[in-house]
Image (cartoon, rainbow, N blue to C red):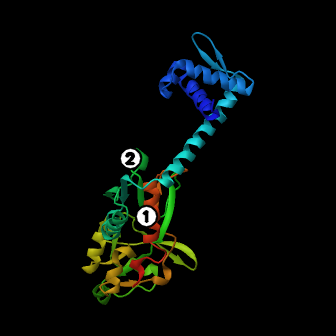
Amino acid sequence: MDIIVGMRTFVAVVDANSFTGAADRLDMSTALVSKYVGQLEERLGTRLLNRTTRSLALTEIGRAYFEQCRQVVDNFDELEAAIRNKNANASGKLIVTAPATFGEMYLASAIVEFQELQPAITVDLRLTDRFIRLIDEGVDIAIRIGELEDSSLIARRFSPIRLVTCAAPSYFEKHGVPDQPEDLIQHSCIIDTNFRNGPLWPYSVNGEKNNVKVNGRISVNSAAATRKMLLKGAGIGLIPSYAVGEDIRQNRLAVVLEAYETSGLGIYALYAHNRYLSTKVRTFVDFMANRFTATPEWDRF
């Protein structure tokens, strides 16, 4: 008898609380299940199960052995899965969620490039600014932007995210340019409610984080909409640079308060904890890491 087969059989018997139930799970006869457990006990030189005609019960030694045995079987299965994944071609359906503005501006084209490299993978891209629960909603990977909360999910960081304070040149001509964060209180600001702190805009003053409560007649839950309002000269906005990088490069928007910008935000891929990633997830995450680097294209203005 193979020792792993014996251990797997023993675990199945305990889980099913019967030899017949274990036989059904393992697709073998009840007699063979009983034989394997008996051989395992003989190998160990001790009884693992107390058997009666109506019930099964773990012995004290059997209970201790069962916990370790399950871990060994799980580790063995994961190791085999890892080897198979490394040797397998990436394929299958990959469900990815991402913030709407970033997804439309950058991720959509990146996924086209990804599929050209991995034609056997089909991608279901779901763009939403709603917080998605990966496991509950059957999502493989979530692209998140900002500061991450503690989570049981695995997070891999790609590019840094710069929050810029900017407005149209026409706005500054009419209302003046703020020299320090506190000056924003005197200005009309466009508030993107996707930010966790809403009207509390974070800045670094003398090495310490300082939140300035800004005022604004317009609030919106979209970086894309915020950008359009900024271009119309409606006010000053705090906005991710990926949404306005080209506008800054073309002088349609002007950045202020650069010396006070905070750091630490980033683009992350989040996925469920698994010691050995499926090939499709691992392939996509590696592609993203190469595609979105530490010097992102939108900050080259």
Mark nearer the N terminus (2 vs 1): 2
**Is residue 178 depicted above or below 204 in this figure?**
below
Query: 10 Å neighbourhood of mark 2: few (<14), some, or many (≥20)?
Result: few
Picture quadrant where residue 18 is located: top right
- The quarter of the rendered structure image containing the C terminus is bottom left
Q: Nearer the viewer, residue 192 or 224?
A: 224
Residue with the mark numbered 1: 197
Find residue 189 and report its horizontal and vertical position in percent. Answer: 34, 75
Q: Picture coordinates of residue 39 (x, y %)? A: 66, 24
Circle 1 packing at 10 Å, graded few (<14), some (14-19), many (20+), is: few
Distance from label 2 to label 1 (Cα)? 29 Å
User: From the image, which quarter does the N terminus lie in?
Assistant: top right
Please state which of the two labelled residues, at mark 2 or mark 1, is closer to the viewer. Answer: 2
Residue 219 coordinates in the image, percent (x, y): 31, 67
Whether residue 61 sits left or right of residue 9 in the image: it is right
Q: Is residue 225 left or right of residue 177?
A: left
Residue at far front of view: 1
Question: Pointer 2: what residue?
Answer: 138
Residue at x 33%, y 65% (from the top left corner): 116
Hey, what amino acid is under mark 1?
Answer: Asn
Is 158 placed left or right of 208 in the picture?
left
Depth order, front residue of 53/172: 53
